[in-house]
Image (spheres, grey):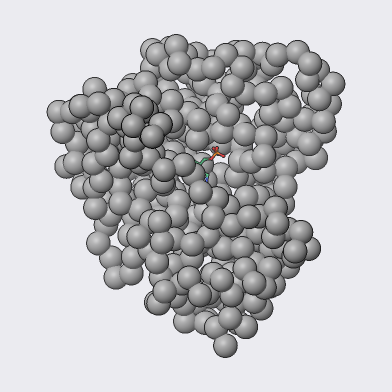
Amino acid sequence: AFSALAQPGLQRLRAYDPGLDLVALRQSHPGLVELGSNENCYGPSAAARAAAVAAIDTAFVYPDPLGGALRRALAVHHGVGPNQLMLGNGSHELLMMLGQAFAGPGLDVVASQFGFAVYALAAQAAGATLVQAPALPGGRPMARGHDLAALAAAVGPRTRLVYLANPNNPTGTWFGAGEFGDFMAELPPTVLVVVDEAYLEYVTDSSIGTALDLLPRFPNLVVTRTFSKAHGLAGLRLGYLVAAPGLVAVLERLRESFNVNGPALAAGEAALADTAHVAYVRQANADERQALADALRARELGVSPSQTNFLLVDFGRDAAPVEQGLVARGVVPRPMGGYGLPTCLRITVGTRDQNRRFLQALDEVLA
Ligand code: PMP
């Protein structure tokens, strides 16, 4: 009954369903291998952990509403002004705020088929219409990345926002810097383009540049990043966006003053400074990603090329029984039915030991 009282955009939405009860699973399966959420299996840097722990001593005061030291450190890190940065309670919060600020009833939001699920949510929650551009054609669904030409074609006079991820979750696909520059040049400056670079630190292919390099050319560009992935701070909820100062100023009208907590700010600053840890995580992930992809391909499964910390695996048949078999053996993958990829599972690249245990469970399930 209350749904009818909600604003129109919300009436058609359903609340996030975590699917599995991970808390219960952790109890019933000690040593549960969690490969469902693209978390960092190596954890945060020791310095970030220590900073978060120390910050608990000041948990009785409100955190710095301006994101102080972390915001300034990020500005230096990316060579932008602090007024081009906004911190968020995870990048998820910022993606939603962009929708609230710039979309709404009567306006369109463009995203790609197989694009990250939050983009559709942000559009719908704002009461806007989601226009989905088809993904690139391809032999197998998982190799189907964002089609920049199709995205540009889907942009119309009512379009205010375009969301795209590089690399994308869940497909693991990516686009190159040159191609993206051409795409931006085609769009009117009234269309805000949000490039979600949650996995950018994992990229090892040098042809995939960051969209941050294009910010001076395109004031309608917004880049989001997160500390949840390569920095291993998913539980502290910390993300940020970089955009033109005027765009950030509009978002500031909407931001909850204390949206990022003290331990997150402290840990983020330490994590950013610990470049050795990120370099270690990136290399270990790249090595294990390759080894795991090889092992899965040797089992004649379809594996998407990936520049992230996960692989999209196509079983060529309904993957639900595979998922159930893995969970029963203490391994948690991510089902892809919600993305229209029911024959696929998304597997986070784990540590060598986690990957070994995953493959062992998989062999039992597929036997
Ligand atoms: N973007 C993409 C593409 C993601 O995969 C995720 C996390 N799954 C997020 C954004 C959100 O991450 P967070 O809110 O933890 O920063």
Q: Quadrant of residue 119?
A: top left
Q: Residue at x 62, y 34 (%)?
A: 237
Between 257 and 185, the residue placed more toward the observer is: 257
Q: Residue furthest front?
A: 1
Residue 3 on image: x %, y %:
38, 34
Residue 341 vertical placement versus 157 (above, below): below
Residue 257 vertical placement versus 317 (above, below): above
Residue 348 on image: x %, y %:
58, 59
Residue 23 vertical placement versus 266 (above, below): below
Q: Residue at x 70, y 14 (%)?
A: 62
Counting labels gives 0
Residue 299 vertical placement versus 343 (above, below): below
Between 94 and 126, the residue placed more toward the observer is: 126
Q: Quadrant of residue 273?
A: top right
Residue 91 on image: x %, y %:
52, 33
Q: Residue at x 24, y 52 (%)?
A: 134
Q: Residue at x 35, y 53 (%)?
A: 114
Q: Quadrant of residue 247?
A: top left
Please say whether residue 305 is visible from this viewpoint: no
- Left or right of residue 353: residue 130: left
Please say whether residue 102 is visible from this viewpoint: yes
Q: Residue furthest bottom?
A: 367
Q: Quadrant of the C terminus?
A: bottom right
Residue 180 on image: x %, y %:
31, 41
Q: Quadrant of the N terminus?
A: top left
- Left or right of residue 13: residue 272: right
